Image (cartoon, grey):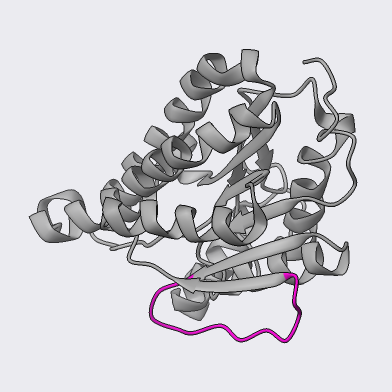
Amino acid sequence: MVKTALSTMEKKVILITGASGALGKQIAAYLESQGHALILHYFQHPIRSENPNVMTIACDLRIPSEMEEMINQVILRFGRIDVLINNAGISKSNVAWKTTAEAWRQTMQINLDAPFFLSQAVIPSMRAHAFGRIINITSVVAQTGFVGTSAYAASKAGLIGLTKTLSKEVAKFHIAVNAIALGYFNTGMIEDVPAEVQTKLLEQVPVNQLGDPLLLAKMIDFLISPEADFITGQTLNLNGGLYS
């Protein structure tokens, strides 16, 4: 992928969905410390920031028209969007035969539909500036499966498929699309898992530790840097050896 003027710029305009969640907060804090302009999306838990280079915005990711309006507001303020981080996600844990139609629908809306519609909405701005990065946060359970996560695993597997195909569609516009498949981290959804189950999960991780969100933030910062211009269509595993 040929370097463009924007790809060599150090500071970028970055939209992070699910920025009020545990992982989202850590990603945002690190990228803010690097001087990037941020748009922090939230839904039920408002975010406040005194930084003039940080915009916070509420949006229901189940509604395409709200996502389109969010993108319009961001471009109105910053003039462009360089990076989209599809971080928002939900898990309606249950075995397949107990998963309701509503739980399945909501999981797909947030975890798969929203990344698609948001990507669709930001691509025109990225094309206009001949630069873009789309990063999809997926999960190791999309690769390995895990009892009680049928809807979640399916949605995250779909996100990997979207990453592969979208990357081929937009590469000629100097837009890179990658996914990061997370293993078990020390914050976020793991907090809803009973302690005894957490212990069993940890035993499955070859490095015998849970992931630190700072590692994720730094990987994202690398993927939006000029050094990552030749990386697209990939699913990068950040899981302590749980899956390879």
> Which quarter shows the C terminus?
top right
Q: Quadrant of residue 44?
A: bottom left
Q: Which is the main secondary structure of the residues drawn in magenta?
A: loop
Q: What residue is drawn where x is 67% and y is 34%?
A: 132
| Image: 150 above or below 161 | below
Can residue 153 be seen from the camera position used here? Answer: no
Say which of 115 and 157 sits in front: 115
Residue 149 shown left or right of residue 82 in the figure: left
Q: Position of residue 185 (x, y in %)?
A: 64, 63
First to last magenta residue range = 42-53
Say which of 47 and 223 sits in front: 47
Residue 89 magenta: no
Q: Quadrant of residue 209?
A: bottom right
Q: What residue is drawn where x is 49% and y is 69%?
A: 189
> Which quarter shows the N terminus?
top right
Q: What residue is drawn where x is 32% and y is 40%?
A: 154
